[in-house]
Amino acid sequence: MANYTNADIKALREKTGAGMLDIKKALDEADGDAAKAVEILRVKGLKGLAKREGRSTSDGLVAAQVVATEGGQSGVMIELNSETDFVAKSGPFLKLAGEVLAAAVALASDNAALVLGSPAGSKKETVQDAIDQVSATLGERLQLRRVAAISGEHVESYLHRTNKDLPPQVGVLVATDGKGAAVAHDLALHIAAYSPVYLNREAVPASTIEAERRIARETAIAEGKPEKAIDKIVEGRLNGFFKDNVLLDQAFAKDPKLTVGRVLASAGGVVTAFARFRVGA
């Protein structure tokens, strides 16, 4: 029987994030040698990558970083997914997230495929290679789901923990001009809470607006509304759609009597871009 203790199992679990049963099997095979057990976990994990390909990755974290640029600031945000929250808070996963974010920041691109093919730090391996290696050790499918990159005179980032025991699950980037920087943090908090889809009405696709108009008209007719009132009802419901989905039309979180647009106008600033991620959503 291999010579190892419960303390050895605990230490290896904290180091790798692998399941207890897998660790025991690896230590048995390695005759109690912790370093060799780690290698065994990785080899077995790599062999199982194809089997894990179809498994759901609904947990994980959001990470973001803002850096100075010649014209102002640039912000990059990633969503890195795992299968369970246990792995999402593990040391190896958190370290991997830092490496993936650093690669995305260096690339300054919102193209996840490009990030996956880029170098992982000073190593020769790619970001995808690094993800596969950690996935092999942890025994879970890991996935870089998406990347956001925005820039402006000022970029604000905000990360929110929906569970104090887990890493951030909601992340926001918001870009403003110089004057808008005064309210950028409050806007980031608002976006995290109210999840707008579009920056302004001009950003809403014409096909979406026409679909909302059609649905509003058909609903009003089905409700038996007077024909002469239908056009007004349709426009009212379309405005309701804008208030729910367009950032500048939304009631401001800190003062619902004001819209986000009015808050920005009072500050003399403008929002030029934003991005919001929620893990698994």
Image (cartoon, rainbow, N blue to C red):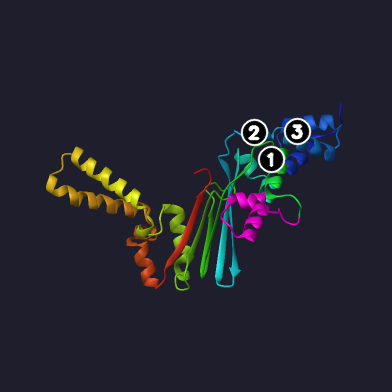
How crowded is the residue under tag 1: few (<14 C-alpha within 10 Å), some, or many (20+)? many
Residue identified by numbered label 1: 135
Kindly state the secondary structure of the residue where label 1 is placed.
Answer: helix
**27 or 117, which lies in front?**
117
**188 or 7, which lies in front?**
188
Residue identified by numbered label 3: 44
Q: Amino acid at mark 2?
A: Arg
Would you place residue 105 above or below residue 16 in this image?
A: below
- In the image, taking residue 217 as reference, residue 244 lies left or right, namely right
Q: Amino acid at mark 1?
A: Ser
Contact (Cβ within 8 Å) of mark 2 with mark 3: no
Q: Marks 3/1: CA distance?
A: 11 Å
Would you place residue 59 above or below residue 73 in this image?
A: above
Q: Marks 2/3: CA distance?
A: 12 Å
Contact (Cβ within 8 Å) of mark 3 with mark 1: no
Give the percent coordinates (x, y) of residue 226. 13, 44
Q: Which mark is residue 52?
A: 2
Kindly state the secondary structure of the residue where label 2 is placed.
Answer: helix
Total marks placed: 3
Q: Marks 2/1: CA distance?
A: 9 Å
Quick one: label 2 or label 3, which is nearer the N terminus? 3
Quick one: label 3 or label 1, which is nearer the N terminus? 3
Contact (Cβ within 8 Å) of mark 2 with mark 1: yes
> Furthest residue to the top?
1
Instruction: Identify the residue at horizontal 23%, vertical 52% (top origin).
Output: 235
Image quadrant of residue 129?
A: top right
Q: Magenta region: which residues? A: 96-122
